[in-house]
Image: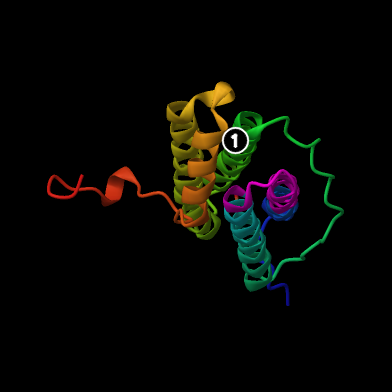
């Protein structure tokens, strides 16, 4: 009896996304190592924590493929890009990486909609929200860096930013969670 509940196309897209999440983890890991080497321990700590989040995303997709009776294919992870040139470059590249990942998630949303695969459509909505959070989180980091002086930030303001990022929460608060009393 065939118990596979995923189409070939959706299964391939999810397996591909699993690799993309693993790649995102490698990118965070390499930027974190770069930041640690450059002496930005707070930024490194934040990026190391985020590398783990990306691996968790990979696991969620892996578990979902198994749960739907389909085949998991673990593929090679592409190498991360070259190290950033400075903190501004690091945050900008991180933002671009999140936007690229969002685009990939949206493609799965569209695919599941087109195939009326409502289980996958429902599953992938978690990632839509997560990507909104992650894009917001990196935009907040870029905002903070801009206030600190952007690419020309002084050593002193980078010191403060780095210290703050050590304790920065892993997730940004989304508009859906805000109220008039608690903006
Ligand atoms: Fe799992 Fe930041 O994408």
Q: Residue at x 60, y 45 (%)?
A: 108
Instruction: State the residue lying farthest toward the bottom.
Output: 1
Instruction: Name the spot of residue 33 as percent of width and height, x first.
Output: 74, 50
Residue found at x 57% / y 22%: 152
Image height check: is 136 above or below 169? above
Residue 15 placement, left or right of 134:
right
The secondary element bearing badge 1 is classed as helix
Q: Is residue 159 left or right of residue 55?
A: left
x then y, percent, for residue 155: 57, 33
Residue that badge 1 annotates: 91
Q: What's the coloring here?
A: rainbow
Please identify the quadrant where the N terminus is shown. bottom right
* Residue at 59% over, 43% down: 111
Does 42 lie within the magenta span? Answer: yes
Q: Residues within 10 Å of mark 1 (few under 14, many from 20)?
A: some
Residue drawn 77% across and 65% down? 72
Looking at this view, is 128 or 27 the one in front? 27
**Between 157 and 147, the one nearer to me in the picture:** 157
Q: Is residue 155 above or below residue 12?
A: above
Residue stretch rendered in magenta on the structure: 25-43
Q: Which quadrant would residue 70 be assigned to in this image?
A: bottom right
**40 or 114, which lies in front?**
40
Taking the view exactly as shown, the residue that stands out farthest to the left is: 181
Residue 136 is covered by the magenta coloring: no
> Could you say which quadrant of the image residue 153 lies in?
top right
Establish if 12 lies above or below 70. above
Relative to 104, residue 89 above or below: above
Residue 39 at what x, y percent from top left? Answer: 68, 47
Residue 75 position, x and y percent, is 85, 56
Foreground residue among 143 and 151: 151
Would residue 173 appear left or right of 123 to someone viewing this image? left
User: Quadrant where the C terminus lies?
Assistant: top left
């Amino acid at each position: 009896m065939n118990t596979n509940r995923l189409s070939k196309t959706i299964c391939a897209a999810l397996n591909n996304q699993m690799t993309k999440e693993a790649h995102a983890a490698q990118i965070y890991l390499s930027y974190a190592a770069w930041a640690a080497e450059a002496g930005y321990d707070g930024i490194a700590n934040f990026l190391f924590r985020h590398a783990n989040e990306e691996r968790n995303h990979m696991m969620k997709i892996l578990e979902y493929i198994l749960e739907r009776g389909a085949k998991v294919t673990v593929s090679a992870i592409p190498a991360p890009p070259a190290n950033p040139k400075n903190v501004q470059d690091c945050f900008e590249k991180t933002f671009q990486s999140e936007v690229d990942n969002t685009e990939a998630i949206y493609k799965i949303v569209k695919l599941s909609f087109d195939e009326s695969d409502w289980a996958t459509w429902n599953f992938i909505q978690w990632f839509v929200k997560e990507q909104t959070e992650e894009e917001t989180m990196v935009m907040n980091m870029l905002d903070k860096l801009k206030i600190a002086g952007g690419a020309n930030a002084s050593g002193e303001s980078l010191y403060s930013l780095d210290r703050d990022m050590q304790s920065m929460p892993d997730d940004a608060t989304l508009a859906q969670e805000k109220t008039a009393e608690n903006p």
